[in-house]
């Protein structure tokens, strides 16, 4: 950085123009930078793509000394440093991919005051040799990127991040800025505590992406539903279709191609060459669809992605928000569309149960799934739920740009239907000592004499045929919502249905069960009048 006095915003702004070639600060960038340049600590929450990097890069350039950036993303360091050097910024990094000579060069540059920015992996910063090195040079600011890694309850926990609390003790006069894109309110608190930044100012950028229209439809024939969604609303548009398995990625890409929509697959099972080719086609071409597992998307900055579709349920709201957030970066309308059904719930519950993680991991995964299910089953504004999840105050009037705002879903009193499902599960278990999955329960309720019903004499049960008032789809909807509400649970590898602690309240009529009516007419972009 320069040897000028720590400056005003205008100096920061001048740096923005001169070094980065941008017109103006975005959102809260200006305020954050001003605060840090003046020597204050900051905790910054901004969604991906919000422009976090400038929040520490500019203070590093404006304040005397080197900005030290702690980042867990070793693989990206070389690229980040190269990009900065291309702008004339004196940047370097130190991590395990370097040989001795390279590291010595960077150390010498730092000590000579010839570095504006130094990127470090957290495990390196802990080392005494690194701390001693830093003590011998001048530091402009400490930036702690991906600060949510300090949270033991997050999925990205890095023990090395805990050691970062010592920075404040050792360098009390150097401002610190912690940045993250994924923090909820709880994580936010944890960052402040664990990094010992009690006096830090907090900057929380809005997580709202108003140009994204959120829609979640009941899954019937997902590939066909996807096809008509694309044909009716996104013909010729670039977009991403997320699927859970590699196999369904391949099949979906094939299906779309066969039906006249140019689509390519992307997943970790393809060789690196194919993956790179498909990714660069997606970035270059105008209207290509990529069918992908969640392996696709990290670091992809394509502004005109017009839709993000999910054929399977994401594991958490964080995941859903991040994946859908890849749409509409140019600020133009885009659609986040998802098909969601009973099997998604059963499959994810099974996956959590059979996972190799410990009890705490499973509890966490289950909590993430619950929040995701609540978003799917809500009768209120989806955007409002998303924002509330990230600790932001939603608009009580609704957003007007999600399916539940556009066509408010009807609810109905599903108490009796719920009792029918639950008593069927009880009868099977009590009278026969049997557990079955959703298909068999629905067949029994509807009085269907399927081969499996006959085989097990289930047409002899007193509950056989008590549910001929609803269709098969409606029954599956009831079971799905009971699972989502925690009134029914999934057990074992076969996805058999069992009661929960709360089921009794419904059976004893102590609790009502409001259910969401499955919409007859799907919401389309036309309903919203936006196109
Ligand atoms: P984040 O780290 O929050 O995901 P980045 O710092 O990578 O986001 O910024 C995302 C993109 O926005 C980058 O291409 C960056 O150059 C651009 N950007 C950031 N701030 C500005 C600005 N003030 N004006 C124009 N473009 C900006
Ligand atoms: Zn809404």
Image (tube, rainbow, N blue to C red):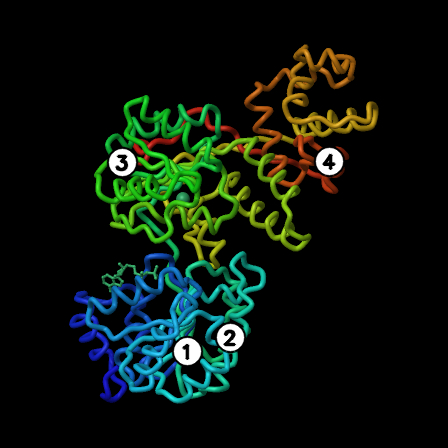
Residue under label 3: 288
Residue under label 2: 195
Viewer-proximal residue among 196 and 403: 196
Q: Residue 118: where, in percent of width, then height?
A: 34, 75
Can residue 250 be seen here?
Answer: yes
- Give the label, 1 or 3, closer to the camera: 3
Q: Residue 89: where, in percent of width, then height?
A: 23, 73
The structure residue drawn at horizontal position 32% and vertical position 30%, both measured from the top left corner, is 230
- Give the label, 3 or 4, closer to the camera: 3
Viewer-proximal residue among 85 and 161: 85
User: Mark 2 packing: few (<14 Cα in 10 Å), some, or many (20+)?
Assistant: many
- Could you say which quadrant of the image residue 222 lies in? top left
| Among the two numbered marks 1 and 3 on one chain, the one whose residue lies closer to the N terminus | 1
Can residue 31 be seen here?
Answer: no
Asked if labels 2 and 1 touch by Cβ distance under 8 angstroms, the answer is yes
Ligand 2 - quadrant of the structure image: top left
Residue under label 4: 499
State the separation of the CA atoms marked 3 and 4. Answer: 46 Å
Residue under label 1: 176
Residue 71 located left or right of residue 434? left
């Amino acid at each position: 950085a320069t040897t000028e006095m720590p400056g005003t915003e205008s100096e920061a702004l001048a740096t923005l123009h001169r070094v980065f070639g941008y017109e103006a600060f975005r959102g809260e960038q200006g305020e954050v930078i001003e605060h840090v340049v003046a020597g204050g600590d900051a905790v910054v929450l901004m969604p991906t793509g919000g422009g976090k990097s400038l929040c520490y890069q500019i203070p590093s350039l404006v304040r005397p000394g080197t900005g030290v950036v702690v980042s867990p993303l070793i693989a990206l360091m070389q690229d980040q440093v190269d990009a900065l050097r291309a702008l004339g910024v004196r940047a370097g990094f130190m991590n395990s991919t370097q040989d001795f000579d390279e590291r010595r060069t960077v150390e010498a540059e730092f000590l000579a005051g010839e570095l504006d920015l130094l990127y470090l992996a957290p495990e390196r910063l802990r080392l005494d040799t690194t701390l001693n090195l830093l003590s011998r040079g001048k530091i402009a600011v400490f930036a702690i990127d991906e600060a949510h890694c300090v949270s033991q309850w997050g999925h990205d926990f890095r023990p090395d991040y805990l050691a970062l609390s010592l920075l404040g003790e050792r360098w009390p006069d150097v401002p610190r800025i912690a940045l993250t894109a994924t923090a909820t309110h709880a994580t936010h608190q944890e960052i402040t505590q664990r990094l010992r930044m009690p006096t830090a100012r907090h900057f929380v950028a809005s997580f709202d992406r108003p140009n994204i229209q959120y829609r979640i439809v009941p899954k019937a024939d997902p590939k066909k539903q996807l096809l008509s969604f694309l044909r009716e609303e996104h013909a010729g548009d670039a977009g991403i279709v997320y699927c859970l398995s590699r196999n369904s990625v391949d099949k979906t890409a094939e299906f779309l191609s066969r039906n006249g929509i140019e689509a390519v697959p992307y997943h970790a099972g393809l060789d690196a060459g194919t993956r790179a080719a498909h990714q660069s086609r997606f970035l270059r071409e105008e209207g290509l669809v990529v069918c992908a597992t969640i392996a696709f998307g990290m670091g992809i900055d394509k502004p005109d992605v017009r839709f993000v579709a999910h054929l399977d349920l994401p594991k958490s709201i964080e995941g859903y928000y991040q994946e859908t957030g890849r749409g509409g970066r140019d600020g133009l309308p885009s659609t986040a569309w998802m098909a969601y059904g009973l099997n998604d719930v059963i499959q994810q519950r099974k996956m959590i149960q059979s996972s190799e993680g410990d009890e705490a991991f499973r509890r966490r995964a289950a909590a993430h799934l619950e929040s995701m299910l609540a978003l799917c089953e809500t009768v209120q504004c989806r955007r409002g739920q998303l924002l509330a999840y990230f600790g932001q105050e939603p608009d009580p009037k609704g957003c007007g740009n999600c399916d539940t705002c556009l066509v408010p879903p009807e609810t109905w009193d599903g108490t009796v239907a719920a009792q029918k499902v639950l008593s069927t599960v009880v009868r099977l278990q009590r009278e026969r000592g049997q557990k079955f999955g959703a298909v068999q329960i629905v067949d029994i309720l509807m009085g269907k004499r399927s081969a499996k019903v006959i085989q097990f004499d289930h047409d002899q049960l007193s509950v056989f045929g008590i549910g001929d008032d609803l269709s098969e789809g409606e029954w599956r909807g009831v079971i799905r919502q009971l699972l989502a509400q925690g009134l029914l649970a999934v057990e074992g590898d076969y996805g058999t249905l069992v009661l929960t602690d709360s089921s009794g309240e419904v059976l004893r009529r102590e609790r009502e069960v409001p259910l969401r009516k499955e919409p007859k007419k799907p919401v389309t972009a036309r309903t919203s009048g936006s196109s």
